[in-house]
Image (cartoon, rainbow, N blue to C red):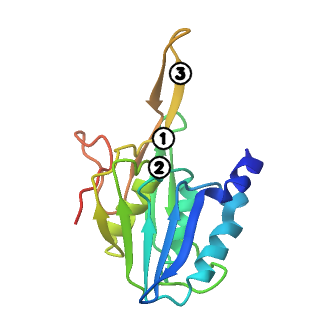
Amino acid sequence: MQKQMVHMNCGFDKVEILSGNIGYVKFNMFADPSVCGPTVVAAMNFLSHVDAIIFDLRENGGGDPKMVAFISSYLFDKPTHLNDLYDRKKDETTQYWTLPYVPGTRLADTPAFVLTSKSTFSGAEEFTYNLKNLKRATIVGETTGGGAHPVAGHRIDDHFSIAVPFARASTPFQRPTGKERALCLTSQ
């Protein structure tokens, strides 16, 4: 799995500086930071002097919340509470915060934009939701896919399986109510 992630450049498709000194980064997953952290460091260091940054998550299917926290850490200059995941079976909550240190320059004062689509899912939704509610980014695009809760697959028979949530995401901005099923976003 690690070799496959590295072979896919950890989901990073494009990192460039557009005219007007606008940074653009398109990546399609939030991969394990223990494997893909160096790819993020290289991308963010390449964009360290841009006047604005665009995160293109229109094809990002999500991934590891630790990577969400790692990438988010480049956008804040102080510890910031991002998200919590409550695991029902373990009856425990894991908090996710920005990291106190990142290799390279932080872009805490650089305007940020996130592009979304109906294919933006899971961890990509968390990243977008966090930045939107922390007033750290402008969100542009379609309503996302609605897959905020971690799931586990269970086989029903030889032909069917189902994905059942085993944990639920919550945020320091707004605790979920009984009617909320996902952290869906709408365009600003």
Q: Quadrant of residue 147?
A: top left
Asked which secondary structure carries label 3, the reply is: strand
User: Which residue of the protein is positioned furthest toward the top in this rendering?
Assistant: 158
User: Which residue: 65% across, 57% down?
Assistant: 10
Query: Which label's residue is closer to the chain start, 3 or 2?
Result: 2
The residue beneath circle 3 is 154
Asked which secondary structure carries label 1, the reply is: loop
Query: Which label's residue is closer to the chain start, 1 or 2?
Result: 2
Task: For the residues labelled 1 and 2, say whether their Cβ atoms are less than 8 Å apart.
Answer: yes
The residue beneath circle 1 is 150
The residue beneath circle 2 is 85
- Percent from the top left, x then y, of residue 59? 45, 53
Q: Amino acid at mark 3?
A: His
- Count of numbered circles on the image: 3
User: Which residue: 67% across, 59% down?
Assistant: 9
Above or below — where is 53 with respect to 125? Answer: below
Mark 3–mark 2 distance (CA, rounded to whole Å): 21 Å
- Percent from the top left, x then y, of residue 33? 66, 60
For the residue pair 61 and 34, the one nearer the viewer reads as: 61
Residue 149 in sight here: yes
